[in-house]
């Protein structure tokens, strides 16, 4: 099983809403990631969890709150987002070192903030 | 932060020809290099990984690495219309020690003309 599953695939929310994005992997990978991708731009790293601990936060605004309940699950809690936060949010996982740095991406959540 | 440079294109190649995609990177200490393919509206998919100088072949794809010139390329032989996509070059984000995420170039938009 080489799949990373993300839900929902599409999300429309108002600026006062609270929502969560979910990600699950069953490859036994030790690291999980959130990336943000705007149209015609490359993916940009937001957060890294290694062994269920937050290891990298790329100065992401506090309206994005990550959570790693266990080694297979990763959530991204959204609150008071802005229209400019509309993007494709990608979850990924990896083993870690060397060839293990390969990232396996989920299908993404297309988020629209109204 | 490490930098990865790619020509954004579009690069137009006739069907059946060889498509050549290029990438340069800023950090001479980078050890491993990744090529991802991304179709419009989809998530990135890993197609090649290379860490040794020289060539690595997988089917119609060949990755070439020249660490002295800080240059990595991707060749696609016998190009097919289904190869039309954006190709992203990536390197480990920080120390390369694992679980640091990947830093992506802006991507090259490849168009295979039937």
Image (cartoon, grey):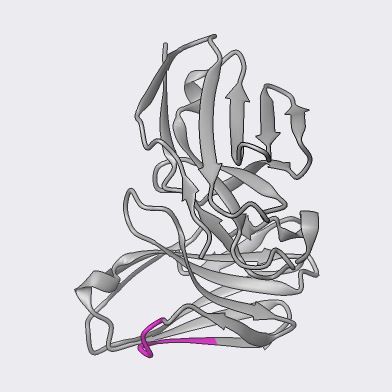
Question: Residue visible at 42% across and 82% down?
Answer: A59
Residue B34 magenta-drawn?
Answer: no
Up the image or down, B72 lies above or below A106; here it is above
| Depth order, front residue of A80/A18 | A80
- Left or right of B72 in this view: A1: right
Up the image or down, B10 lies above or below A78; here it is above
Residue A63 magenta-drawn?
Answer: yes
Question: Residue visible at 64% across and 62% down?
Answer: A4
Question: Residue visible at 22% across and 81% down?
Answer: A14
| Depth order, front residue of B76/B15 | B76
Q: Which residues fall within the magenta stretch? A: A60-66
Q: Does residue B37 appear in this view?
A: no
- Give the x, y percent position of residue A3: 68, 58
| Depth order, front residue of B43/A6 | B43
Q: Quadrant of residue B76?
A: top right
Where the N terminus of chain A falls, by quadrant? bottom right
- Give the x, y percent position of residue A113: 25, 73
Q: Quadrant of residue B63?
A: top right
Up the image or down, A88 lies above or below A39; here it is below
- Left or right of A28 in this view: A109: left
Question: Residue visible at 60% across and 30% down?
Answer: B74
Where the C terminus of chain A falls, by quadrant? bottom left
């Amino acid at each position: 099983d080489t799949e990373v599953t993300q839900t929902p695939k599409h999300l429309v929310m108002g600026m006062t809403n609270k929502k969560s994005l979910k990600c699950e992997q069953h490859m036994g990978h030790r690291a999980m990631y959130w990336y943000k991708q705007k149209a015609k731009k490359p993916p940009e790293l937001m957060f890294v969890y290694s062994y269920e601990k937050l290891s990298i936060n790329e100065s992401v605004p506090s309206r994005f709150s990550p959570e790693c309940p266990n080694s297979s699950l990763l959530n991204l809690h959204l609150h008071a987002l802005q229209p400019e936060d509309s993007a494709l949010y990608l979850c990924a996982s990896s083993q870690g070192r060397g060839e293990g740095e390969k990232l396996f991406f989920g299908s993404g959540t297309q988020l629209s903030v109204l | 932060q490490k930098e990865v440079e790619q020509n954004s294109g579009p690069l137009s190649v006739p069907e059946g020809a060889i498509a050549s995609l290029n990438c340069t990177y800023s950090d001479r200490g980078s050890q491993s290099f990744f090529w991802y393919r991304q179709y419009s509206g989809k998530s990135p998919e890993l197609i090649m990984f290379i860490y040794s100088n020289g060539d690595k072949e997988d089917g119609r794809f060949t990755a070439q690495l020249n660490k002295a010139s800080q240059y990595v390329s991707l060749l696609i032989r016998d190009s097919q219309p289904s190869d039309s996509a954006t190709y992203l070059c990536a390197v480990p984000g920080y120390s390369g020690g694992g679980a640091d995420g990947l830093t992506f170039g802006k991507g090259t938009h490849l168009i295979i003309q039937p």
